[in-house]
C-alpha cells in the first residue's frame, strides 16, 4: 500500500482594489517612500474599504477564485480551515461562515490563529488530516483585514500591513509529492513585543481602552526583527539539513512577507541565489496569514511538478517554522 502524502492541487487568491501607496502614506504620517522602501521593501499595500466586510469577505473571494480556476465542487470539500489573526468577530467562527457562503455544505470548519505563522501552521494541520486517510479534500485559507487593527497615525505599523486572502487545496498523493517535513516552533517570550492589549479576556473592551487606542497593533519593531531574522533563518537551514537539501536542490523559497531584509537574511543563510527567492512584499505589504498563499498564486506559473519548495514564517507570540514541500502539478 502506497504511503499517503498531502499535496497542494489548487491555488486561489484575492486582494482588494484600493491601493495604499507610500506616496499616499506620506500625506498621512511623517514618513517617505525612500525610508519605507529601504527598511521594509514595501511600495504599496491593498486595503479593504467597503463597510461591513471583514476577513471572511477576503477568504470567500480567495476560495471562489480557487474553485473557479480548478473546477472544484464545494460540496466535495471535507474541511475548511481559515488561518487568520483578524476574525470577523469573537466567538462566532469565521471559517464556519466562509464554508457556508462558498457552498461547502459537507465540510466542518474552524479558525486557526498563530499570528503571521497562522497559514504555515495551517499547512501542517491540513496535511495531517489528509495523511490520516480520513479526509480527501481540505481547503486552507489565509485571510487578514489588517487595516481593521492598524492605527494610521502610528508610522511604525501603518507602513507595514495590508489586506488580502489566499487559498490552497490539499488532497492525497501517492507519488511522494506534497508535504515532506516540517519544523515548527513557538516561544511565549514574544507576547509583549507584538500584541493588541485590549479586547481579550485580560482587558475587555471599554470606553477607556478605546480612548487609549489599545485595540490597535503594538510592535516593538527592533526586537521582533531580531527574533524573526534568527528564527526564520534557523528553521529554514534546519529543514534543509534534515532532508539532505542543498542550495542547488531547493527550487524556491517562499518566506513570510514581513520585511525584505528578513527574507534576504533567510535566503543568505540557506545559500540560495536571489532568483530562487519569491518576493511580492512590494505589492502587498505584510498581509499576515495571506502572504504565503499570495506568493503561491502570484508565482504558480513558475512551479513545476517535483519542485522542492521551502516555506518559512515568523509571527507574534512568538511563532515560527519551516515546511518542506514537493510541488505536485504543472499549471495548465
Image (cartoon, grey):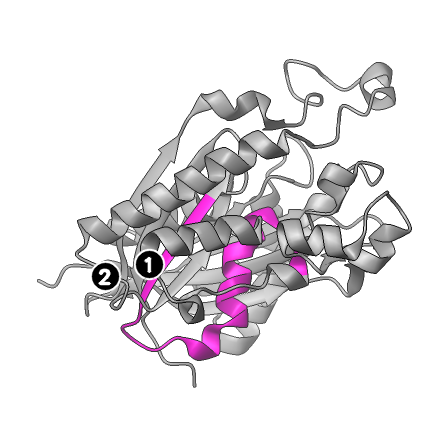
Q: Provide the residue span drawn in magenta.
A: 284-313
* In-image side of 18 versus 263 (left or right): right
Whether residue 332 appears in this view of the structure is: yes
Position above or below: 142 against 247? above
Q: Pick the quarter of the image with the C terminus.
A: bottom left
* In-image side of 277 versus 31 (left or right): left
At mark 2, the secondary structure is loop
Residue at left offset 40%, top offset 61%? 253
* In-image side of 73 versus 204 (left or right): left
Residue 208 lies in the magenta-colored region: no
Q: Which residue is mark 1?
A: 271
Q: Which residue is mark 2?
A: 246
* Separation of marks 1 and 2 at Cα, in angstroms: 8 Å
In the figure, residue 275 lies in which quadrant? bottom left
Number of the label disc, if any, that sits on residue 219 = none
- List the single residue furthest toward the right: 27
| Pointers 1 and 2 in contact (C-beta within 8 Å) | yes
Q: Give the x, y percent position of residue 330.
A: 37, 80
At mark 1, the secondary structure is loop
Residue 305 lies in the magenta-colored region: yes
Q: Give the x, y percent position of residue 258.
A: 57, 48
Number of marks: 2
Q: Give the x, y percent position of residue 262.
A: 50, 48
Amino acid at each position: 500500500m502506497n504511503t499517503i502524502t498531502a499535496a497542494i492541487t489548487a491555488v486561489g487568491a484575492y486582494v482588494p482594489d484600493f491601493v495604499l501607496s507610500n506616496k499616499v502614506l506620506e500625506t498621512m504620517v511623517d514618513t517617505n517612500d525612500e525610508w519605507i522602501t529601504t527598511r521594509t521593501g514595501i511600495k504599496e499595500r491593498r486595503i479593504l474599504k467597503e463597510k461591513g466586510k471583514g476577513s471572511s469577505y477576503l477568504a470567500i473571494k480567495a476560495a471562489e477564485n480557487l474553485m473557479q480556476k480548478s473546477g472544484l465542487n464545494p460540496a466535495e470539500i471535507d474541511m475548511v480551515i481559515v488561518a487568520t489573526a483578524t476574525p470577523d468577530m469573537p466567538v462566532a467562527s469565521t471559517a464556519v461562515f466562509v464554508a457556508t457562503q462558498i457552498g461547502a455544505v459537507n465540510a466542518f470548519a474552524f479558525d486557526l490563529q498563530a499570528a503571521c505563522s497562522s497559514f504555515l501552521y495551517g499547512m501542517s494541520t491540513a496535511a495531517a488530516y489528509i495523511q490520516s486517510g480520513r479526509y480527501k479534500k481540505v481547503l486552507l485559507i489565509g485571510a487578514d483585514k489588517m487595516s481593521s487593527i492598524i492605527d494610521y497615525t502610528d508610522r511604525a505599523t501603518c507602513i507595514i500591513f495590508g489586506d488580502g486572502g489566499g487559498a490552497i487545496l490539499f488532497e492525497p498523493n501517492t507519488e511522494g509529492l506534497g508535504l515532506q517535513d516540517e519544523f515548527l516552533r513557538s516561544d511565549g517570550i514574544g507576547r509583549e513585543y507584538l500584541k493588541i492589549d485590549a479586547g481579550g479576556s485580560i482587558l475587555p473592551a471599554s470606553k477607556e481602552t478605546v480612548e487609549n487606542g489599545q485595540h490597535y497593533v503594538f510592535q516593538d519593531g527592533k526586537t521582533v526583527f531580531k527574533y524573526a531574522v534568527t528564527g526564520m533563518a534557523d528553521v529554514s537551514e534546519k529543514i534543509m539539513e534534515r532532508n539532505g537539501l542543498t542550495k542547488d536542490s531547493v527550487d524556491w523559497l517562499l518566506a513570510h512577507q514581513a520585511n525584505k531584509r528578513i527574507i534576504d537574511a533567510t535566503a543568505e543563510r540557506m545559500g540560495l541565489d536571489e532568483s530562487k527567492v519569491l518576493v511580492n512584499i512590494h505589492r502587498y505589504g505584510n498581509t499576515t496569514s495571506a502572504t504565503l498563499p499570495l506568493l503561491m498564486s502570484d508565482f504558480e506559473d513558475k512551479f513545476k511538478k517535483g519542485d522542492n519548495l521551502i516555506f518559512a514564517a515568523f509571527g507574534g507570540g512568538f511563532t515560527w517554522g519551516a515546511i518542506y514541500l514537493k510541488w505536485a502539478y504543472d499549471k495548465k
